[in-house]
Amino acid sequence: MHLSPGQLKVVLILALLQELQVKPQREVFQELYEKDLRLCPDCFVGQSELCVGIFQKIAEPSDWSKLLKAISLIVDRRAIYYLRLKDQAQVVAKRKIIDARNHKAENVEKAFYEQEEQPGGFHLCRTPSRKPPRFVSYLEQRGHASASVWFYMMHYVSPLLMQELHLQGFPVPTTYASCGLTHFQAYAGRTLTNYFEAEEGLRMELALQLIQLSLKLTFGFSDFRIFLTDFTGDNFAYDEDSKRVYLIDLDSVVLVDASSAAGQAEKYVPLPGEGFTFDVSAFCSGHQLDANIYQACLLLRDFLLKNLDNERLQLLLEQCVACQDDFCDMRFQHAYDLIKVLDSKI
């Protein structure tokens, strides 16, 4: 029997609907976790109790909602689920999809050291005399299994950093659970791209929080500095109830161990090209770069505060981005000036 493309679509939708009707959402996540557990038992076995608890708390969405999600995953490989728990809490489940065939689970540490440097993703500045790196030892002391730390650093660092930054008081969503390659975090509102055309007062409040966050990340925690390499509106959200900006994605990061560095502040000079271009070795030099501030100013100038009727702010943003040698040694002073002006306008 030959079916037309239209008929095949109908059959596919009916088949998906039937599958979704008989498989509760909690079972879907349970199966995904068990799949990850087989991939690397040492990495995830310690998560079992917490994960089973979160699976049982998931309130079942409608069959129609599950169907739409299943169809969207066919055309969009970003596995992001918006869930509601039985206590009505809103949760976002983000899943990292990796090619298990190319993963050597028997020696995650060795695989991490052997991986080739690629644009984006997670980069850990390594101190040659320290093996394992201090960041690994730090997380182990915080209760993370060694295999889990190496695996997440290699494939999906966001769950590690989200939990730690939340404990350190950074504006990131609360973590409910990390279950293998699926991370459950609190819903933090709509992304900042939804506010690029908002009223001026709100945009200035968002801008103030972004500049403050760029400094907080640069100063870091426990002598670890965090440099985002994807400082875009999609990676931040605004919670209208708490009126806070949250950093909701931490996959594209350079982490610097500054415990043995001199710590001098230094201006970041972007590489030629569109958008934010960077050289990992520049981040790993040990200096306190102003790269986060540069990216925040770029986002404000080109998107969030674009066409804002305030000459003083526009001038400060332009000076922050350009940071010409004759007038600018580094961008930290521009950040403080922007905070002062924005704070006075809110």
Image (cartoon, rainbow, N blue to C red):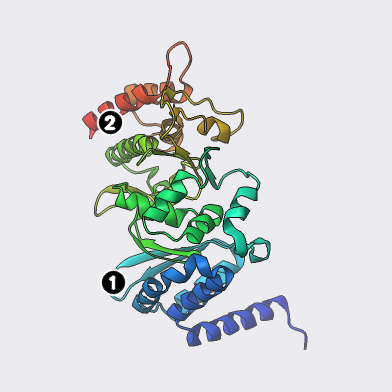
Q: Quadrant of residue 46?
A: bottom left
Q: Residue at x 52, y 73 (%)?
A: 32
Q: Mark 2 or 1, which is nearer the eye?
A: 1
Q: Nearer the viewer, residue 113 or 217?
A: 113
User: Would you place residue 35 above or below residue 295 in this image?
Assistant: below
Kindly tell me whether residue 327 is visible in this rendering.
yes
N-terminal label among 2 and 1: 1
Q: Residue at x 36, y 65 (%)?
A: 91
Other-residue count near label 1 (Cα within 10 Å), few / some / many at <14 / 14–19 / ≥20: few
Q: Secondary structure at mark 1?
A: loop
Separation of residues labelled 2 and 1 (CA atoms): 36 Å
Q: Residue at x 64, y 77 (%)?
A: 9
Q: Residue at x 34, y 76 (%)?
A: 57
User: Would you place residue 255 above or below residue 82 in this image?
Assistant: above
Specify whether 4 is left or right of 184: right
Specify whether 323 is left or right of 202: right
Residue furthest to the right? 1
Where does label 1 land, which residue?
A: 88
User: Would you place residue 89 above or below residue 138 in this image?
Assistant: below
Where does label 2 land, which residue?
A: 342
Specify whether 199 is left or right of 33: left
| Whole-percent x, y for residue 196 in the image | 40, 42
